[in-house]
Amino acid sequence: MKNVLTIAGSDSSGGAGIQGDIKTIASYGHHALTAITAITAQNTQKIHHVQPIDVREQLSVMDEDFVISAIKIGMLYTVENILAVIRWLEDQKCSIVLDPLMYASTGKQLIREEALIALDKLMSKVSLITPNLFEAQKITGIQIKKGINMEMSCKKLYQMYHTPVLLKGGHFTWENQAIDFFYDGNKMVTFREKRLVSNCTHGTGCCLSSAIACELASGKALNKAISGAKKTVTKAIRDGYLVGQGEGVVHALGN
């Protein structure tokens, strides 16, 4: 059993964020450590409020007691939290997966506008970034309409941060497939899955990034870790369930 740390916001609907990460990490048989960056008041239909939490003290106690095998970073929300994470990561030797959360699926902004520049600095300090199409467009300025745009965006992101990139294509349909592009500075790899028709997709991105962290904690190479995590997410979507009147949640702990 490995210790996998998730640095993220709390989702009071239980589908994504810290709650989703804990379930994904548990599905791998690992132990989830948590550092909470914000508390959200949300349900399956909207995010009503975000209350930031200072993450510094939570991180400071980690090294006193735990051997951390991998880190997943999600919602950070404030400049202060991003800078605190950057400073703390200087002493960490394990793999770090950053899901650069900017917007919820409902459109709610999950990072303060003034924090975007600080997030830029963090993206060069990690092992992998996993933006979705909207986040990639915001960062690179490249409008993504087809596969070639995804390739261009991957390469530009790598040029900007010198960090391997997994560009998630879940919002983009190409030949009835959901296609993710992975670029490590040398080789472009595509991960193709038949698009699943489901209204239980809340927490998909969190599940993927925390699953990659778990795969890396087990010693897998980056491309193998992504491949394994993709299988975990596909199953979690298939096993998803409804909890309220809005979008249902993925179920990483399904049998």
Image (tube, rainbow, N blue to C red):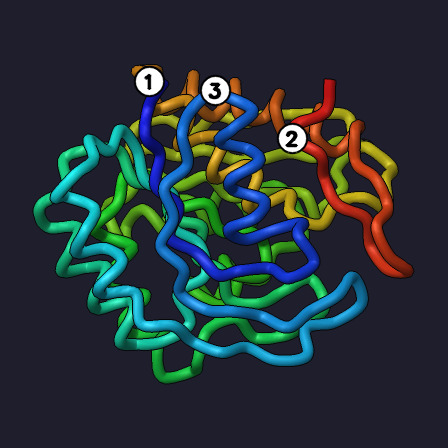
Q: CA distance from mark 1 to mark 3?
A: 19 Å
Q: CA distance from mark 2 to mark 1?
A: 22 Å
Instruction: Tell me where residue 222 sits by quadrant.
Output: top left
Q: Residues within 10 Å of mark 1 (few under 14, many from 20)?
A: few
Q: Is residue 68 left or right of residue 224?
A: left
The residue lying toward the viewer, choosing from 82 and 14, is 14
Local SS, label 3: loop
How far across and how far down the image is residue 105, in percent? 69, 62
How far across and how far down the image is residue 49, in percent? 61, 80
Local SS, label 2: loop
Which residue extends farthest front?
65
- Give above or below for 195 relative to 117: above
Amino acid type, label 3: Gly
The residue shown at (35%, 54%) is: 35
Local SS, label 1: loop
Q: Residues within 10 Å of mark 2 (few under 14, many from 20)?
A: many
The residue lying toward the viewer, choosing from 85 and 97, is 85
Instruction: Residue under label 1, please give it.
Output: 221
Say whether disc 1 or disc 3 marks the residue closer to the N-terminus. Answer: 3
Instruction: Residue under label 2, please give it.
Output: 252
**Residue 220 in sight in this render:** yes
The residue shown at (26%, 76%) is: 80
How far across and how far down the image is residue 21, in percent? 52, 42
Say whether disc 3 or disc 2 marks the residue closer to the N-terminus. Answer: 3
- Mark 2 against mark 1, which lies toward the viewer? 2
Which residue extends farthest right?
245
Q: CA distance from mark 3 to mark 2?
A: 12 Å
How far across and how far down the image is residue 254, in percent? 72, 24
Instruction: Residue under label 3, please give it.
Output: 29
Amino acid type, label 1: Ala
Q: Is residue 245 left or right of residue 147?
A: right
